[in-house]
Amino acid sequence: MAADRPLSLEALAALDEAAEGRRPSPARQAVIRVLLPVLTFVVFVVGWEALVYLARYPDYILPRPTVVAARLADTMRTGLLWSHAWATLAETVLGFAIGSGAGVAIGLAISRSAVLERMISPYLVASQAMPKIALAPLVIIWFGFGLTSKVVIAALICFFPLLVNTVTGIRSVPRKKIELMRSLSATPAQVFTKVEWPSCLPYVFAGLKVSSVLAVVGAIVGEYIGARAGLGYLINASGAGLDVVMMFVALFAITVLGMAIYFAIILVERRCLRWTAGVTQGPSDVAG
């Protein structure tokens, strides 16, 4: 039947051109990506303002966005918000770096050793089964109310996603690629740097994006349990004084902080994957 005949190259090219013509231009795609979130935010804020105005909620129940914005500007001007935000940022970044680095390193070791995986995998899974908020009081007791305890909690939360994604990424590399590199007398280091690691990077960055948000959560959890500074501490102190407006200011700062780290990782991912695309073009350079 005619429907069962394969399409010719000319027909496939015509289909590609037609599909390309239906796609919006890059400029239009950029406008859509920016405009839709902005419009959604504007609608949300207007709806929030209207709800508070019509229901006549007092500020200690649900403050208006304009009141929150005014307090936000005031705390930024006085420097109060900056000092707490920098404390949370330091805890988040350090915990994220340590937990992610340990997850990648142990993931690489596990992916290369079945014996090591059988030895430590049950304990790794058991450690993740325990809620980190239940461990937070112990961590505070062991490491104190300073920076170290928040970094430890954030690192514990970040660790497992990177471990799982690294193991999955390494094991997803096609064996034919590795065998081809070895047939060209590639060293284990060359196989890793030119095939395994570039193929694993998308999985690693997927884990990094998840862990970046979890790191903020870990830092805030630690500050809730016990801290001298930080956005979580600011929420606790504001709640004790029934200052709901300040609590909303701190929540907004936490959201912005998490989004900033997340999108920073996306930018790094785009650059790294563009670079690895050139590295993995082929193993011909090994033969030379």
Image (spheres, rainbow, N blue to C red):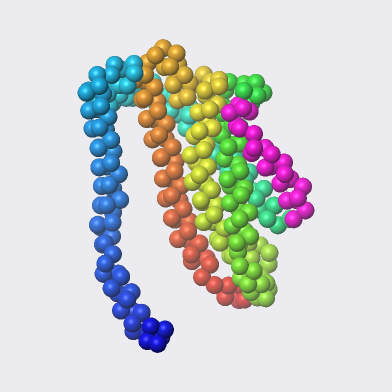
Q: Residue at x 58, y 28 (%)?
A: 133
Q: Is residue 167 above or below residue 122?
A: below
The segment highlighted magenta reads 114-136
Q: Quadrant of residue 144?
A: top right
Q: Quadrant of the N terminus?
A: bottom left
- Locate residue 182 relative to residue 221 in the image: left or right: right
Q: Would you say residue 127 sits in the magenta stretch? A: yes
Q: In front: 97, or 175? A: 175
Question: Residue placed farthest to the front in the image?
Answer: 1
Q: Quadrant of residue 78?
A: top left
Q: State the count of labels.
A: 0
Q: Is residue 200 above or below residue 179?
A: above
Measured from the top left, where is residue 38 in percent x and y? 27, 42
Measured from the top left, where is residue 156 in percent x and y? 61, 36
Q: Residue at x 36, y 25 (%)?
A: 249
Q: In front: 70, or 78? A: 70
Q: In front: 264, or 125? A: 125
Task: Using the rendered image of the protein, determine whether residue 70 is visible from the camera's viewpoint.
Answer: no
Measured from the top left, where is residue 73 in percent x and y? 29, 25
Q: Would you say residue 137 sits in the magenta stretch? A: no
Q: Is residue 211 above or below residue 246?
A: below
- Locate residue 174 relative to residue 36 in the image: left or right: right
- Locate residue 255 relative to residue 209 in the image: left or right: left
Q: Residue at x 50, y 41 (%)?
A: 212
Q: Is residue 136 above or below residue 259?
A: above
Task: Using the rendered image of the protein, determine whether residue 146 is visible from the camera's viewpoint.
Answer: yes
Measured from the top left, where is residue 102 in percent x and y? 63, 44
